[in-house]
Image (cartoon, grey):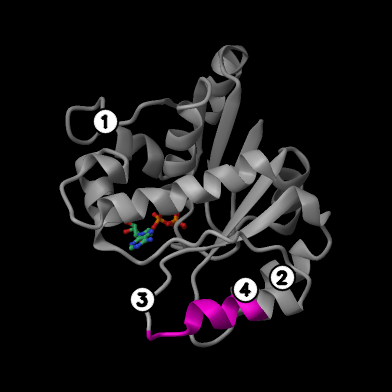
Amino acid sequence: MIITVTSYKGGVGKTTTAVHLAAYLQRLAPTLLVDGDAIRSATKWGQRGDGNGLPFKVVSHAQMVRHIRDYQHIVIDTEGNPSDDDFSDLARNCDFLVVPAVPESVATDGLTHTLAKLQELKSERYRVLLTMVPPKPRTEGQELRAMLTANGIPVFTAEIPRLVAFEKAAAEGVPVYGIKDERAVRAWEAYEDAGKEICNG
Ligand SMILES: Nc1ncnc2c1ncn2[C@@H]1O[C@H](COP(=O)(O)OP(=O)(O)OP(=O)(O)O)[C@@H](O)[C@H]1O
Ligand SMILES: [Mg+2]
């Protein structure tokens, strides 16, 4: 299965999502993470710490061709702000598109544009993942979910809470389950739930 993570907005948790979905899928079958971002955030994540903190291989686009036949699952991290053509190209050439979105109090241009583009896609092939969802009693997550649903956009039931554990994980070069933090289990379970939804429909 080819899973692509993309969004028009930057900084919405694409790389964090790609790393954790790859960690989830790797437990099921050999999984390759393709770092499609020129800044190489996913590659750098894997190089921090002892350089062996991620349980899957991370390669660049160019390297992908060499490795692809050895893997059952491919997760592709992309850079923010794709052109419309690139977005359509990414969406068409994967089995499942994951679009992270951060609930914020106002709908931004980026989100509006993403909505318009998503509505052109077949709904069974993609889902929006709410990321960095602020804790209760804040309601931005529920509001964004309601807005997306009202617009006919499929949304993961799972949502990713805003937790410092994710930043620590990136800094230490491991998935979030690998750090010492009382919320690390909760953080990992959120991505496990998202992974299950991708695999089970
Ligand atoms: N659920 C979360 N809770 C708290 N912080 C998070 C969460 N997810 C990601 N972050 C942090 O937010 C920042 C942006 O995340 P990330 O790099 O995954 O986004 P991105 O969409 O890949 O960004 P870019 O567009 O620059 O590639 C990082 O510092 C990351 O550690
Ligand atoms: Mg990124």
**Which segment is the magenta one?**
137-146
Q: Is residue 116 above or below residue 168?
A: below
Which mark is first along the chain, 2 or 3?
2
- The amino acid pointed to by label 1 is Gly
Residue 75 locus on image (x, y percent): 55, 35
> Of callouts 1 and 3, which one flags the residue occurring earlier in the amino acid sequence?
1
Q: Residue at x 49, y 82 (%)?
A: 140
What numbered label is drawn on residue 135?
A: 3
Q: Position of residue 57 (x, y in %)?
A: 42, 24
Task: Give yes or no for contact between labels 4 and 2 (Cβ–Cβ under 8 Å).
Answer: yes
Element under label 2? helix
Using the rendered image of the protein, determine whether residue 104 is visible from the camera's viewpoint: no
Q: Residues within 10 Å of mark 1 (few under 14, many from 20)?
A: some
Name the secondary structure under disc 3: loop
Mark 2 residue type: Leu
The crowding category of the residue bearing disc 4, from other C-alpha atoms within 10 Å (few below 14, some 14 to 19, many at least 20), is some
Residue 96 sits inside the magenta stretch: no
Dot 3 amino acid type: Pro
Instruction: Say the numbered circle drawn on residue 111.
Output: 4
Compared with 36, 64 (above or below) is above
Q: Are marks 4 and 1 in contact (CB under 8 Å)?
A: no
At 42% across and 35% down in the image, what residue appears? 23
Residue ID for mark 1: 53
Specify whether tag 1 is near ligand 1 (CB below 8 Å).
no
Find out whether the residues at labels 2 and 1 contact each other: C-beta distance under 8 Å. no
Whole-number angstrom distance, CA of label 3 to CA of label 2: 25 Å
Quadrant where the N terminus sits is top right
- Judging from the image, what secondary structure is the residue with disc 1 in? loop
In which quadrant of the rendered image does the C terminus lie?
A: top right
**Residue depicted at 39% across the width and 40% down the height:** 42
Measured Cα–Cα span from mark 1 to mark 3? 28 Å
Q: Label 2 neighbourhood size at 10 Å, few (<14), some (14-19), many (20+)? A: some
